[in-house]
Amino acid sequence: MELVYRIFCSSVGKKYITALSGVGLILFLIGHLSGNLLIYLGPDKLNAYGHFLQTSKHILWPARIGMLLLITLHIWTAVQCWFENQAARPIGYLNGIPYGASWPSRYTMVTGLTLAAFILYHLLHYTVMVQALNPTGKNFHDLVDAHNRHDVYTMMLTGFSNGWVVLLYLVAMGFLAVHLWHGVSALFQTLGLRTLRNQASVEWVAMIFSAILFMGYVSIPLSIWLGILK
């Protein structure tokens, strides 16, 4: 019980949970992007991938439950740490900005909570396929390809044919990039992998990694909206 208390109730334990759950979420982001990029290989590849996920319930549901657990732990411990940091300094900084804090770190809570709201929207938009959230008016459930599989390719083309939806996704991915920029850097710090000697390199790695994911994710809605993908 003492070990459980240390992990979930101490500041150090919460930071480790935030960091390790962050690792899990980063791995998911890489895997999710890899799957989405199949859209560039054409409808058959993407629809086959989507069909595999939908029919592999023994993989899909444990993965979904695991993701929900990771997101819950990440948000809960991050918010707890934020409030503890605020309580430790009841008198704010003179100019409102912590000394030495990078600008992405100043907006971690804002970007994180915004992303939580976006994740909910994204799930309702493309996973639950709520028709009210689709400005095109089409029912994504009705989209089926020649092999009687859910037509993920057409669903994405339809969903991103609306400029406002594209803009929303671009802004959300911008928030994700800023959040990752700080998050990856903080991850190295929490796990004791960041030193005075390598801190500049860590910052560059964090920035480049977040930029790569940003470009990968935004390339899809932009390619569809610009007519590159048809």
Image: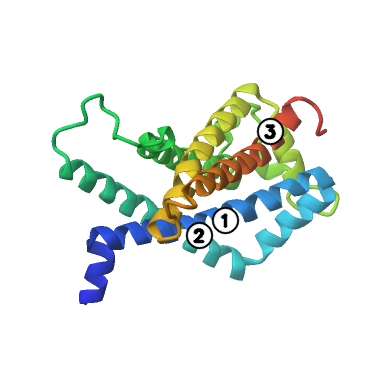
Image height of 175 relative to 146, above or below: above
* Inter-mark Cα distance, 3 to 1: 19 Å
Q: Residue at x 49, y 37 (%)?
A: 178
In the rendered picture of this protein, how many numbered marks are placed on residues?
Answer: 3
Helix, strand, or loop for circle 2?
Answer: helix
Q: Residue at x 16, y 45 (%)?
A: 88
- Percent x, y for residue 26? 54, 53
Disc 2 crowd rating (10 Å Cα; few below 14, some 14-19, many 20+) is some
Q: Please state, as top left, top right, bottom left or bottom right, where the N terminus lies in the image.
A: bottom left
Disc 3 crowd rating (10 Å Cα; few below 14, some 14-19, many 20+) is many
Helix, strand, or loop for circle 1?
Answer: helix
* Inter-mark Cα distance, 1 to 2: 6 Å
Q: Amino acid at mark 3?
A: Pro
- Percent x, y for residue 124? 53, 42
Camera sees residue 151: no
Q: Residue at x 85, y 49 (%)?
A: 146
Disc 1 to disc 2: CB gap under 8 Å: yes
Q: Earlier in the sequence, mark 3 or mark 1?
A: 1
Q: Which residue is mark 2?
A: 24
Image height of 204 relative to 72, above or below: above
Helix, strand, or loop for circle 3?
Answer: helix
Disc 3 to disc 1: CB gap under 8 Å: no
In screen coordinates, is 149 left or right of 176? Answer: right
The outermost residue toward the left is 90
Q: Earlier in the sequence, mark 3 or mark 2?
A: 2
3 vs 2, front mark: 2
In screen coordinates, is 146 left or right of 178? Answer: right
Q: Please state, as top left, top right, bottom left or bottom right, where the C terminus lies in the image.
A: top right
Q: Which residue is mark 3?
A: 221
Give the label on residue 5, or none.
none
Give the label on residue 28, or none.
1
